[in-house]
Image (cartoon, grey):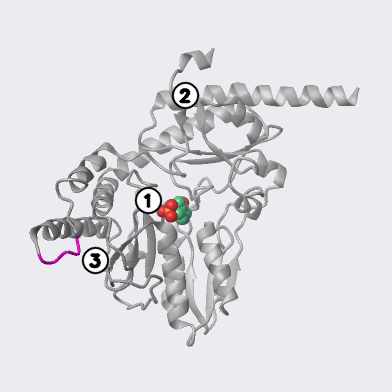
């Protein structure tokens, strides 16, 4: 019955994976694909100048969103590249002086894999644990710090469970001990206020496509004070003050600037709306289903995130029964990796409960109608999957 109510494309509930580009961002970018097509690095004529000027406006828009200076923003292809450059850049430049890096077990794979690589190259890396809420322990961080520590890299918001780390407290520790602090803020930009000076963050990775901007464009913030030296990864023409060679994709930079402007202006109202829808969805589910486990802290969490495990209902079967909802899960067969989510395992879930988990990511373009529909459908299908399971179990027992 419910399916007939809804024709057309599935309801998109996977806004942590990527987001639709806001139409206002598309419009800001369009002229720079065709009419204003110059190379922003062409210093000898009008075509270059007009694009360079627009790119600098965008850089200022990005900077303002995180309370940085425009000179502290370096455009690159996304958060993966920014994370690589932040960690490798510091490790390579300072390796002879300081060798130790601190990160945490629930980081995005692009941070963890970069740290594994740094270990192979001779760095020592400490991986902080997270508790059952997904939070790091500041005492454990304090204990891990030593004279040799050059960098702490802790993500602001976790991409599966939406948990927000205490960045201000981490920043205070880093500052006191004279250690650089990097944060992967891909899931934080536009979701919670970010002030790099207040938080004492020295390096921050952000990306467009998680916040209604274009794919393939992000930035690394690098503080001027204290000055941080990074060894670049790319050799080439020396663009972005030699930190990132390669022609800037000007239309994407301009789109990201608009993305940030909108994020800054709309975040308070958007956060409130998303949190209300998210909390309503959770209330509907817990009101009509038992055996629900919310993964990660509800208190320290971005408004649009819900990550829940349903006892006796594996995510694979639930999602197969719900082609009209686009969600993701912590189970093995639905994601690129072979194992169930290392993040859910890190917060203490059994692999069974990890495989029963759904990640629901609400975003700017979701409507209350869609969320009501999703709640109904989830309750129906989870109930069916569970009773199917019971029948099989009973038959086996007879
Ligand atoms: C998506 C994401 C990334 C990767 O960003 P890209 O711009 O796609 O390279 C890194 N970290 C987190 C937390 C993310 O959510």
Give the residue furthest to the bottom. Answer: 97
- N-terminal of the two: label 3 or label 2? 3
Q: Give the Cα separation between the discs numbered 3 and 2.
A: 42 Å
Q: Residues within 10 Å of mark 1 (few under 14, many from 20)?
A: many
Query: What residue is shown with label 1?
Result: 192
Question: Which mark is drawn over residue 321?
Answer: none
Which residue lies at the image location 26% right of the left edge and 48% below the top edge?
Answer: 255
**Left or right, 393 with reference to 68:** right
Which residue lies at the image location 30% right of the left edge and 73% below the top edge?
Answer: 242
Question: Mark 3 or mark 2: which is in front?
Answer: 3
- N-terminal of the two: label 3 or label 1? 3
**Left or right, 301 with reference to 57:** right
Identify the magenta region. 40-44
**Left or right, 153 with reference to 292:** left
| Residue 370 vertical position relative to residue 75 in the rendered view, above or below | above
Q: Residues within 10 Å of mark 2 (few under 14, many from 20)?
A: some
User: Which secondary structure type mostly characterizes the magenta part of the structure?
Assistant: loop
Answer with the quarter of the image where residue 307 lies. top right
Regarding residue 292, the answer to whether it shows in the image is no
Q: Circle 1 — which element?
A: loop
**Left or right, 136 with reference to 345:** left
Quadrant, the N terminus: top right
Front residue (pair 71, 291): 71
Query: What residue is shown with label 3?
Result: 69
Question: Which mark is drawn over residue 372?
Answer: 2
Answer with the quarter of the image where residue 22 lies. top left
Q: Circle 3 — which element?
A: loop
Where is residue 196 shown, x and y percent of the image? 34, 64
């Amino acid at each position: 019955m419910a399916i007939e109510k809804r024709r057309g494309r599935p309801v998109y509930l996977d806004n942590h994976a990527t987001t639709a580009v806001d139409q206002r961002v598309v419009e800001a970018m369009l002229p720079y694909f065709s009419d204003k097509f110059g190379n922003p690095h062409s210093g000898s004529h009008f075509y270059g100048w007009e694009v360079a000027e627009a790119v600098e406006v965008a850089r200022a828009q990005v900077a303002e969103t995180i309370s940085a200076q425009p000179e502290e923003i370096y455009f690159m292809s996304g958060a993966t590249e920014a994370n690589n450059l932040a960690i490798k850049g510091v490790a390579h430049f300072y390796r002879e002086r300081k060798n130790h890096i601190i990160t945490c077990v629930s980081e995005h794979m692009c941070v963890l894999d970069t740290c594994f690589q740094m270990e192979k190259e001779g760095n020592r890396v400490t991986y902080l644990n997270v508790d059952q809420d997904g939070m790091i322990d500041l005492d454990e961080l304090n204990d891990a710090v030593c004279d040799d520590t050059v960098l702490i890299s802790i993500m602001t918001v976790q991409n599966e469970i939406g948990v927000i780390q205490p960045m201000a407290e981490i920043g205070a520790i880093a500052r006191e001990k004279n250690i650089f602090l990097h944060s992967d803020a891909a899931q934080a930009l536009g979701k919670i206020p970010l002030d790099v000076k207040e938080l004492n963050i020295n390096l921050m990775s952000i990306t467009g496509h998680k916040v209604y901007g274009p794919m393939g464009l992000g930035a690394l913030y690098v503080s001027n004070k204290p000055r941080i030296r990074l060894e670049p990864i790319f050799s080439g023409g020396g663009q972005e003050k030699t930190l990132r060679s390669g022609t800037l994709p000007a239309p994407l930079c301009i789109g990201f600037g608009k993305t940030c402007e909108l994020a800054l202006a709309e975040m308070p109202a958007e956060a409130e709306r998303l949190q209300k829808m998210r909390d309503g969805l959770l209330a509907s589910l817990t009101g009509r289903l038992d055996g629900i486990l919310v993964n990660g802290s509800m208190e320290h969490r971005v408004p649009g995130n819900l990550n829940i495990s349903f006892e006796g209902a594996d995510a694979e079967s639930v999602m197969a029964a719900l082609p009209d909802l686009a969600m993701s899960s912590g189970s093995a067969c639905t994601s690129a990796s072979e194992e169930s989510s290392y993040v859910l395992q890190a917060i203490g879930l059994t692999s069974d409960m990890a495989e029963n988990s759904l990640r629901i990511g609400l975003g700017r373009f979701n409507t209350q109608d869609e969320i009501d529909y999703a709640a109904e459908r989830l309750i129906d299908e989870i109930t069916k999957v569970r009773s199917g399971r019971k029948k099989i179990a009973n038959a086996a027992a007879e």
